[in-house]
Amino acid sequence: MPSNVSTNAFDAPATPEENGSAFRAARADGARLRNAMTVDVEEYFQVGAFERCIRREDWESYASRVDTNTRRVLDLFAEKGIRATFFTLGWVAERQPQLIRRIVEGGHELASHGYAHDRVTSFDARGFRADLERSKKLLEDAGGVAVRGYRAPSFSIGKRNAWALEVLAELGYAYSSSVAPIRHDHYGWPEAPRFAYQPFKQFPLIEVPITTVPVAGRTLSFGGGFFRLLPYGVARWAVAKVNREEGQPAVFYFHPWEVDPEQPRIADAPLRSRFRHYTNLKRMYAKLDRLTDDFAWDRMDALFLPQASSLPAAE
C-alpha cells in the first residue's frame, strides 16, 4: 500500500459526535435528517453470487431486465419526490444509453459501479485505472453529465487494496462509497470508520462507507440483501438510530433486480447464493415503499460533498 494512504485513523476513528456535527449544523431546525438513497444498477446475472456459474462470455445470452426494473424504481422515486444516486455499470450504459438518460432526466446522480462488475481485488493499479476510465467515459457519453462518484462492485476495497482509493483520487473522483466496515464472507473492512471521512491530506476525495450499526458486539449492515432478508422493522430501527443518536445520514443501497420476482432462476448457482438472491423478492418493493415514506432521502453528492472539508481526516 502506498505510504501516503493512511490507515491510522481506522485504529481510532472519529467519534459519532465529531463526525456528525457537520450534518447536524447543516440541518434546518425541525427538519428531518436526509439520508442517501443509492441504487447499484446491474443485471441479475452479473451479481457476485453468480460469478462462478455464469461465464462473462454468456452474458449476452441472458434476457436483459435492467431497463424495466430500473424504470420501476425510477417511477417509485418520482412518485415520492426522491432524488437518488445510481451507481451504474459501464456495461449497462454501453447497451442501454436510453436508461442512463432517463436516470439523469429524473434529477438523479449518475455515478460509476465499474465497467463489468469486476471486484477491485481482481485488478492491479493499472488495470483498475483502465476500468475506471472506460466506465466513466461510457457513462458520461450516455448521460451527458460529469461522473464524480464511484462504488466498488461487492464493496471490494479493503485494507489489502487501499491503494485503490488513491487511484480514484488521482482520476479526479470526488467521493467513493466502496468500503463496508463489517465482517462478511465476500467483503468487508471491519477496522474502517463507520461514517464518511477523508482518506488523504493531499487529495479532496472522501470515502462514504455503507451505513452500519453496532448490535451486541457486532457491526451489522441493513441495506441490499440484509434489507430484503430481515424484517422491515430492523432497517427502520437502524436508520432512526443512526439519525437520532449519532446525527448521521444513513447510506442505503439496493439493486433493481431485487424488485423483480419474475426474473429467471439460475439453477446451477450454489444453494447459499440462491437463498440470498431470491428470498423475499416479492416483498422488496413494498418494503422500499415504506422506507421511502418513513425517512427523507437525497443524492450522495448533495449530502456529502458540501460537508467534505469538515469530515474527519486520516492521519
Image (cartoon, rainbow, N blue to C red):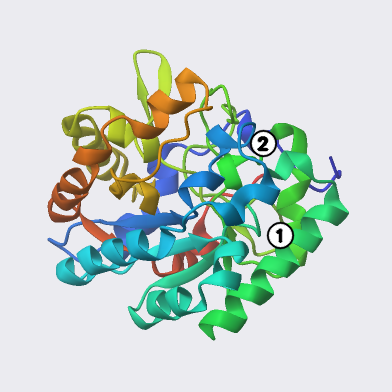
Residue that extends furthest to the bottom in the rendered view of this protein: 144
Q: Is residue 256 above or below residue 239?
A: below
Which quadrant, please, contains the C terminus?
Answer: top right
How crowded is the residue under tag 1: few (<14 C-alpha within 10 Å), some, or many (20+)? many
In the rendered image, residue 297, in percent from the top left (x then y), is placed at: 27, 60
Residue 174 falls left or right of residue 41? right
Q: Amino acid at mark 1?
A: Leu
Q: Which residue is mark 1?
A: 168
Nearer to the camera, 159 or 135: 135
Q: Is residue 69 above or below residue 133?
A: above
Would you say residue 118 is visible in this rendering? no
Q: Earlier in the sequence, mark 2 or mark 1?
A: 2
Q: Which residue is mark 2?
A: 158
Q: Quadrant of residue 18?
A: top left
Nearer to the camera, 162 or 132: 132
The residue at 60%/31% (across/down) is: 189
